[in-house]
Amino acid sequence: MQAYDRFYTIDKDFRNPYARDRDRIIHSGSFRKLEYKTQVFLNQEGDFFRTRLTHSIEVSQIARSITSHLGLNESLAEAIALAHDLGHTPFGHIGGDTLDECLKSDGFKNGFEHNFQSFRVVSSLEKRYKGFDGLNLTFATLEGILKHSYPYKKSFLPSFIDEKFNLETHPSIEAMVVDRADEIAYITHDIDDGVNSGLIRFDDLRESLLIKEILQKVKDEGISEDEDEMFRYRFVSHLINHLVYSLIDFSKDKIDNSKIYSASLPSKSELPIGFEPKLETEIKKLKKLLFSKLYQHKDIMIKMYAGKQAIKGLYVGLNEEPKMMPKFYLEQLQSRNKHRVIADYIASMSDRHALSFYNDMYGRL
């Protein structure tokens, strides 16, 4: 298939194919629910903190900036970025891990994986059209969502996926940009949210040479850490700019932007998008630092444990009494496995819906 081809025919449109993909994603129910899905901090923690929706928008902005500068297809990158987290469960990664454990404990060896769930959302679970399931996105957009993480061949992927998308090949360069834009976005905004919440301080991160360099840039502007909100804002701006410009400088001579390279570059070939090796090392060190200092902070762990219990409780309760599900999911029990339908329903929930439903079942969590 060509990058712009779709699996179902559609009427002609004034938009380019990838802009049409973007619009279909934005108007989907799954996209709206990202507003109340956890990034790191539970949605109830406060209006300032990022959610999956604000994260997806930030990833899109960064990806569009990079692709525009590199002469790549901006609309394709935007569509992939806005859809890349549609499969996330409530309560962040712990929600997905818990749902995975629940399914595997019931004998479903393929479990649950949020990247593949994002692909399933746009290719089958969204019901927006009479003639087909899913949003009928272009091949390049679907491929970019499916191949969000390397290696692309995974044990839980059905055989037809490889037949249609050729998992021995890289996705488009635009999809590679989205992958790194995702990394840039969550590193920067997790630090911002972490400092704003009081769970970490910039002093906790000074062992990172990258952070020290960025902090110095802010201080060179004459802004002190006492100017809390301004300092954080300038820090985030400098860190994003530093990473974006570094990625562009390292990648610009390695790419061919003459066409969209969907399913054509061998997966064993080197990725043309990335950072120079020293910075790659510093980014890995920073992510380890954030894991130990922020993601495993006791206040975060308590909230995540509560989310884990909610997912378990919902899964057990709905398996015992599936009639608690809405009609849309209940009707699917006639043709699909009950456990999978329940997992899809739970994964579709926002944090507040999951907590409310759990409390209705068992009492307040």
Image (tube, grey):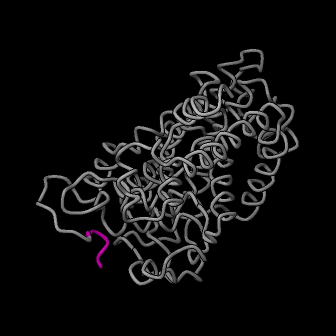
Residue at 65%, 64% in the rendered image: 106
Residue at 48%, 39% in the rendered image: 34
Residue at 33%, 69% in the rendered image: 139
Q: Is residue 3 magenta?
A: yes
For the stretch drawn in magenta, the main secondary structure is loop
Instruction: Residue 113 in the image: state x and y as whole percent.
Output: 58, 61
Q: Is residue 137 left or right of residue 98?
A: left
Q: Is residue 126 above or below residue 309?
A: below
- Along the viewing direction, whichever of 43 and 77 lies nearer the viewer: 43
| Residue ranking furthest to the left | 12
Q: Quadrant of the N terminus?
A: bottom left
Instruction: Residue 275 in the image: state x and y as whole percent.
Output: 65, 61
The span picked out in magenta is 1-6
Instruction: Residue 337 in the image: state x and y as whole percent.
Output: 47, 64
Q: How many marks?
A: 0
Q: Quadrant of the C terminus?
A: top right
Q: Is residue 221 above or below residue 33?
A: above
Q: Residue 296 sits in which quadrant?
A: top right
Residue at 36%, 42% in the rendered image: 29
Q: Is residue 181 magenta?
A: no
